[in-house]
Image: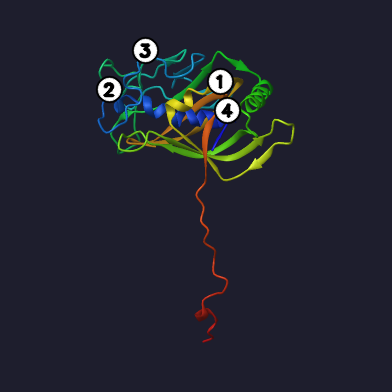
Amino acid sequence: MWAPPFFQAAPQAFFFHEIFGHRVEGHRQKDESEGQTFTKSVNMPVLPDFLSVVFDPTIEEFQGTPLNGAYHYDDEGVKARRLPLVENGILKTFLMSRSPIQGFPQSNGHGRRSPGYEVVSRQSNLFVESSKKVSDAELRKMLIEEVKRQGKPYGLFFDQVTGGYTTTQRRGLQAFTVIPLIVYRIYPDGRPDELIRGVDIVGTPLASFGKIMATSDKSEIFNGYCGAESGYVPVAAISPALLVSEIEIQRKERSQDRPPYLSRPTSEIKR
């Protein structure tokens, strides 16, 4: 099902971490089992030209909130630094450990692991920056205008997410799933917002990023732990809310099984 959605900021920060961040980790660009979504996209547009992405483990807090992805040195002893990864939509580099890839022979301080695992390139603090910012009220107004323009019955507002996952290896689909916790329908005729259940966000990265229309002027934080080849490492993502012209959703899996009406006969035998 397709609908024009309006993402709240914290879910969108997770969206960028899960869907974009893993695909720009350096070791994936030389692994033949990986899909290598952005391997040949350096100095080419990968996001709308009003968006930039920076990884910065040197920032320890944002608006008073501590950031999980902060550190002074990575797990290979390389000093942490600010890394502009996408500038005005153009991909400039990858997250690098000491393991080189073609065109990027040096680490930029993103070799990470949890104890007992080998180091690979991993995310730190991800910041999404925008030059096309409007207020939340204006973003909602733009959503309703887009719903009317497309002739849709409603748009979607994703308020919270509980998790998600993505496939980066080439033997699987280059797709993602984000699992929302709170979702509302936004009606263009002025009806009250309607809370709905049972939907997941699905899609492919390049198609989804190409449909971003604008962002809000406020950013929110996703703090968490990211699991991958080198174990679980603490990360953070900071992003404004986004207006997206359309995105694909699907119904959540659910079982139709019901418990038995009667208890086991043996449970009523007196001894």
Which one is earlier in the sequence, the residue at label 1 or at label 4?
4
Q: Amino acid at mark 2?
A: Arg
> In the depicted view, which residue is nearer to us: 204 or 18?
204
Q: Which part of the image, by quadrant, shows the N terminus?
A: top right
Helix, strand or loop at label 1? It is strand
Circle 3 residue = 43
Q: Tell me, yes or no, if residue 156 can be seen here.
A: yes
Residue name at image x 55 percent, y 74 percent: 263
Q: Are marks 4 and 3 in contact (CB under 8 Å)?
A: no
Q: Amino acid at mark 3?
A: Asn
Q: Position of residue 102 (x, y in %)?
A: 25, 18
- Report, in whole angstroms, how far the alpha carbon at label 2 lies from the one at label 3: 22 Å
The answer to whether residue 43 is left or right of residue 211 is: left
Q: Which mark is residue 182?
A: none
Helix, strand or loop at label 2? It is loop
Q: Amino acid at mark 1?
A: Met
Helix, strand or loop at label 4? It is helix
